[in-house]
Amino acid sequence: MQGGSSGIGYGLKYQARCISDVKADTDHTSFITGTLSLKEENEVHLIRLSSDGTELVCEGLFSHPNEIWDLSSCPFDQRIFSTVYSTGESYGAAIWQIPELYGELNSPQLEKITTLDSHVGKIKSIIWWPSGRHDKLISIDEQYISLWSLDFSKKAAQVQSQESAGLVAQSGGAWDPHDMNAVAVTCESSIQFWDLRTMKKTNSIEHAHVRNVDYNPKKTHILMTAEDESGIRIWDLRKPKVPIQELAGHTHWTWAVRCNPEYDELILSSGTDSTVNLWFTSASSNNESMSESLVESPTRRSDPLLHSYSDYEDSIYGLAWSSREPWIFASLSYDGRVVVESVKPFLSRK
Amino acid sequence: MEVDDVPLDDKAKRMRDLLSSFYSPDPSMSSPSTNSSSKYATLDAINTTSFDPDQYMNLLVHKSNLEGLLQRHVEMAAEIKNLDTDLQMLVYENYNKFISATDTIKQMKSNIVGMEANMEQLLEKIMSVQSRSDGVNTSLFEKREHIEKLHRTRNLLRKLQFIYDLPARLGKCIKSEAYADAVKFYTGAMPIFKAYGDSSFQDCKRASEEAVAVIIKNLQGKLFSDSESIQARAEAAVLLKQLDFPVDSLKVKLLEKLEQSVADLQLNVEEVSNASVDSNHPSTDSSPATAHEISVREFAEAIRIVSHLLGVLRIIWKDVLLLEDVLPEAALPDYSLEAAQAAVKLYVTNKFSHLQSKISDALTKAHIRQKDSGDDYSLQVALEGGKKAVLQGSMNVLLDFRQLLDDDLGLLVKLRDSIIDWVQEGFQEFFGALDGHFLLLSGRHNSASQDQGLTKGILDDKVLAGLVLVLAQISLFIEQNSIPRITEASSQLIQLWFLILNKYQYYVMNMGLPLFLEKSVGFSGQLCEKFLHLYIKMTTQRISILQKRKFTATNWVKHKEPREVNMFVDFFLHELEAIRSEVKQILPEGLRRHRRADSTGSTASSRSNPLREEKLSRSNTQRARSQLLETHLAKLFKQKVEIFTKVDFTQESVLTTVVKLCLKSLQEFVRLQTFNRSGFQQIQLDIQFLRTPLKELAEDEAAIDFLLDEVVVAAAERCLDPTPLEPPILDRLIQAKLAKTREQNPISP
């Protein structure tokens, strides 16, 4: 594996925006992705990396009634996932279950466990608690943040609490993996932090144009954001005024940012300039002894950008690390191409 | 083996695999990939250890017809033959090797046979040599002893002779006033007098002591006589001390004198540092009106200070040299060297901080003035001021240092190396500090403007963006002009020093200079790029906020039919125009690639129009289904357009980059929406209208065309019914818009 085009490709039929790691699948490295086509029949693809790591195999292909704007896999059941979809005029969200006998690939129907309606505005994203079994879900629409309690046996979901954030145009968010009561929500001019017990805002980072946000899975209080103009910033929530570190990001917008689930110094970002950048940063781990870090190097201060994957044709909106093999990540460009790459060659170099 | 080296065809590869599976007991070692062709799929078992011929035969007969069987037979026969020959080859090769190995071993054996006898002979001979040498040693031992004894006696006799001669010799020395020699002789004989002076050499000792007494008397007289030179007096003092003469009383007298000189010295040093501090005062409270006058005064003062410093140092050094002669123990040169070091260093650092404050003054002053008046020319004023400050300031500094270094005063010669170091360090620190200061200037205002309300923020942003642009240009200026000039000047200096410094130091300098150049130039190159990017970022951010508002506020799914070009296009063009005027003031004009001059470019641009029309009309008839595929195919065949290229320091390059980034943002915003037919047509109209003015603004026509098309394609993809406007209608709407703008401001075309 050397050079830029070391990745393993997989083509979707239509354009697509979202890809998610199937975290609950502990036997295989799998990803789930859905297409975004206004006029064609949309599909959900379950993709698996073959055991020798040289091929991407389509493990399941299901039709989905509407174009998919957001998709995330349930962290404790590999057959369950959520989608946010649009019919062109209205938006909706649902929880789906992959049918048990999907071995024969003749486009079986997905079982819809439940839809999450009772939304007022455009729903933007559905979040599962990332660190384990938790029967709650969060949905974020433009104005409201809602906490759902999920009952798989009755196949029902109920709004447990709902609160309006005001007219701030919420666009997405992330659930704190260290605290199941804390959620970060990205709004037009700030990032707001909610306590789910009281459904009140607890904190905020006043910072405009945040596209994407991700918690550091290993260290509490550390958060990274991707922004249109200013690249990537890393924040310590105890000091929300100024970021701890800033990374250059991308030539155009930085769309998504993901912290590696195991080695939290590794940060991946994708942008509308058709590149995926791999960063190495020690700032998020400087409150711990350096000896624990993955890569020991005297030149760590030099350039945080380890590598730029540029073998893409279109903007990259979907990005996911594999939690089973944390040196592997999947990226999805708008033209529907999934590329799975390993970051190993760029680690050994340092 | 040779088999490994030859590139293999399929058959040979298979053969090798068969052989390797034969040699290795593990069947998994044979690579599975070679047998993957479907023909052998059922017959894989032939290469495994668990091969059952009967079963294989059955399977074969069962599966294939006669023809197939025959063919298989022929194939297999050929294979077997090949295998046989290969096997033979292998066996033959191995046998060959085996034979040669046996030969080698045989040879080795025969060689070893005679060896033991030879070794024994050798040992014998060595023994006999050793015994002979022992014999020679013992026979010569006695004679050697005798010779040594004689030598010792002779030495002793010589010493005796010296001591008996001492009084006469001292007398001679006194006569010729060679006191130094006399003292040397006497101190040399002293130990012997101490040991035997009371017995055998009594007469001798007495006579020499008398002579020495005369010497001491003479020396004392010399020391206290004012007519003698200081050097002679110092010598006398030293000799006296060597003769164990109690010199305490002398010391007191001398030290008094020294103290006075040292006090003088300190006074001078303080004066110098005060003077150099003073020179910085005027810069702090300068007002713009008298700035020129003050700078002239400063310059004069600076030169005066340098010469003053030199003068003071010269005086001090002279004194110090004298003092050193008189009393070497006081280590005065070291002290004074330290003091001078401190003074010069202080001077160097002061010089640099002064320079920096001057530059930042020039910048901030311009900035404040700009805020007050909003004058268009203020950017240029700031730029010129900054440039002048940087260049003149650093040249002045270098001139001063040169003066300092050209002087061949002993003290400064000693300090020369360190001064060079300080100047280099100073320049590096200076540029580093400048870097930090610039960043501070841009960064502080950045956060400040974010705090303010958005409406006010946009206005402030504009001013700030201008400042950032000025900074970028100044950084470039530093990189392109002043650093080469400064380094040129300092390299002249360095050449001068080369004449003085010896070779060793020359090499050190040689290594030091490139490092210095690299550091300072490298820094500035990064800096100016940083600023340029900051500028582009700030301007595009402004526009993309506009775009975002437009796109999120409009309901594209329920859009009404397009009647005219949207207002936001006007805003967009207006913003770009503002950026152009800003950029025009600061950045140089690039070599515009003229359309006529560039033949390939012209054909591309003339062809692009019909192509586009064609594409749009085709999508009209065929509609969406094949559209995605089509655009993908088109993208494949179209040369991949590099959207994000490197930014140069020209008006066009910056402007083009801004336009490109904005169009890319536009595409992204479009992709986030869903359109009905009218919404799509509105986008189509707006983009069509933008085409001409954008191409006039930016230099990379192909990329702009590509991006504009991309926006339309993105809108078509996100549209429920992508029927484009008929070309005549499109044309009419655009003409209407053009007429309207012409009406509003008739001067502009």
Image (spheres, coloured by chain):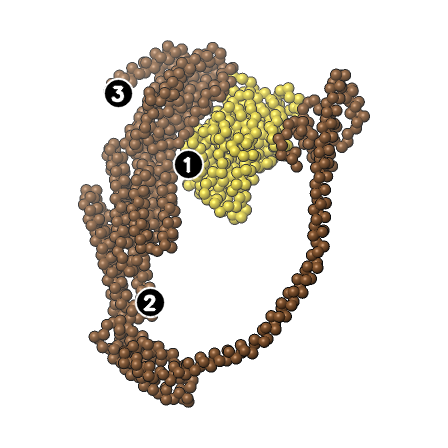
Chain colours: A yellow, B brown
Tell me if residue B307 comes above or below residue B437 in the rendering.
below
Left or right placement of residue B547 versus residue A328 in this view: left
Which residue is rendered at x = 33% and y = 67% of the image?
A: B331
Which residue is rendered at x = 71% and y = 33% of the image?
A: B89
Left or right placement of residue B497 versus residue A329 in this view: left
Q: Using the image, name the chain to which the residue with label 3 belongs.
A: B
Residue farthest toward the right in the current orientation of the protein:
B54
| Label 3 Cα neighbours within 10 Å, binned few <14 / some 14-19 / many ≥20 | few
C-alpha span from label 2 to label 1: 65 Å
> Which circle, 2 or 1, is nearer the viewer?
2
One can see residue A203 in this view: no
The residue type indicated by label 2 comes to Ala
Mark drawn on residue B331: 2
Q: Are marks 2 and 3 in contact (CB under 8 Å)?
A: no
Disc 3 marks which residue? B748
The residue type indicated by label 1 comes to Glu
One can see residue B643 in this view: yes
